[in-house]
Amino acid sequence: MEQVNSGTTLTQDFSIKVSDHMGGETLKHCYQCGTCVSSCPVAKLTSSFNPRELIKLALMGAEEEIISGESIWLCCSCYNCQERCPQKVEIADVFYALRNIALKKGYIPSVYSKFSTALFDEGRVVTISRFVENKRVTLGLPSLKEVGLDNLRKILQATGFVRLEEKEEE
């Protein structure tokens, strides 16, 4: 490991780790042209998300900075960047790989942790309020069906999703 002036610790093999993950295979094709940033609707809305900068950090080996931050979770998966990338870097897929690495290390934004808890507890990411239930009746829509929580929890456990829910409790 090497430390740079900004205090960021660099892990030499991080770009290899990302490239070895499904979705991260094209990371090293990036030559930092900036097409991804100019194509990104999220980057237009917030300076907190810059795909080019995140790719650069991944290539440099700034593992801890990337996976412990919230920036990788801001990608909206619109694929504008991938469609326009002259080097065919699958940028949105690289972000999936980075998110998977972050999850394996126990990093998850609180909003996603809350979603996973709600899904595990209620079978839905968003709780259906009485107002919504009553509005459905007024609109002539059928009542929402009960969620088969036992089967859902089996699926969540089998896929490893349940570990996200457990992180919230720690």
Image: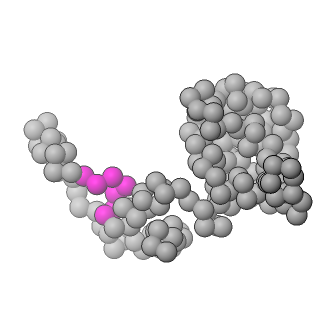
Q: Which image quarter: residue 80?
A: top right
Of the pair 90 and 106, the residue shown nearer to us:
106
Q: Nearer the viewer, residue 1 or 131?
A: 1
Q: Residue at x 65, y 57 (%)?
A: 68
Please name the residue shown 16% across and 42% down the image.
136
Magenta region, residue range: 122-128
Rendered residue at 77%/29% (across/down): 34
Please state the horizontal and vertical placement of residue 150, each as a whole percent of the image: 33, 73
The answer to whether residue 135 is magenta is: no
Seen as rendered, the residue at the extreme left is 138
Q: Quadrant of the N terminus?
A: bottom right
Is residue 126 covered in magenta?
yes
Q: Does 61 appear above or below 105?
A: above
Q: Is residue 19 visible?
A: no
Where is residue 17 shown, x and y percent of the image? Answer: 80, 60
SS assignment for the magenta stretch, majority? loop
Q: Is residue 160 visible to us here?
A: yes
Q: How many marks?
A: 0
| Residue in the image at 60% along x and 67% along y | 106
Residue 111, above or below 51: below
Residue 145: name its quadrant: bottom left
Relative to residue 121, is residue 92 drawn left or right?
Answer: right
Residue 63 shown left or right of residue 134 in the figure: right
Figure colour scheme: one colour
Above or below for 145 versus 81: below
Position of residue 90 relative to residue 1, above or below, is: above
Q: Quadrant of residue 148?
A: bottom left
Query: Can you give x and y, in whole percent of width and height, for residue 108 in the image?
Result: 56, 59
